[in-house]
Image (cartoon, grey):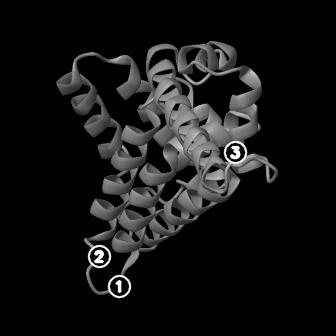
Amino acid sequence: MSETARDHAPRRRRADAQRNRERLLAEADAAFREQGTEASLERIARRAGVAVGTLYGHFPSRAALLDALLRDRHEALFTLGDALLATTTAPPPFEALTRWMRAVAAHGAGYTGLAEQLWGGLDDPDSELHAACARLSAAGRALTERARAAGAIRAELTPDDIFALVSAAAWLLGRHRDTAQADRLLTVLLDGLRP
């Protein structure tokens, strides 16, 4: 092998690996949108044109694959949570909480079964989704506590109640093809938080 060929071989392998990773993410996104988060990983690998071992080389678990797919969306939610919790620019407590709930519910509705995966990631510290779920939960907890302290929501509501309602809202949004009806039902659910 010439010196020039040796210089380019590692770079080519890295470029191939990056292309494989991108194809796997694209196919996983399509499969999860069509079939939910329990879609076959073997089928995703096949559709990406790689062996299932290649998929597991990039993403050692389903949670790792989901974490990679959701990273940018999670960052957007983290930014929203920070903005809603900022003391100088935050909207009133009820509005902040319901904006947060709508955003997280829309996120959870992206793939059938995603809300359950996120709920499970919160309980499993070994899951690749754990850190993102914990951060989302912390923002929701702080927004709930702020709204409750301000008397903007029912006193008996806990952060766990809010998380359960967000999961239900995600299910609702994910199942309704009529987005106007889904939004109307979500508004009724959120109005039920008021004292």
Element type at marker 3?
helix
Element type at marker 1?
loop
Number of other residues with Cα within 10 Å of mark 1, as a class: few under 14, some 14 to 19, many 20 or more:
few
Q: Which mark is on residue 87?
A: 1
Q: Are marks 2 and 1 in contact (CB under 8 Å)?
A: yes
Which comes sooner in the sequence, label 3 or label 2?
A: 2
Of 83 and 161, nearer the camera is 83
- Counting from the top left corner in percent of width and height, residue 118 is at 61, 41
Residue 154 left/right relative to 47: left
Q: Quadrant of the C terminus?
A: bottom left
Of 78 and 59, nearer the camera is 59
Write the residue at 50% across / 24% down. 27
To which residue does mark 2 refer?
Answer: 90
To which residue does mark 3 refer?
Answer: 121
Q: Amino acid at mark 1?
A: Thr
- Counting from the top left corner in percent of width and height, residue 83 is at 34, 72
- Counting from the top left corner in percent of width and height, residue 169 is at 42, 34
Residue 92 left/right relative to 5: left
Q: Which mark is on residue 98?
A: none
Write the residue at 51% across / 51% down. 71
Real-space Cα distance between discs 3 and 1? 29 Å
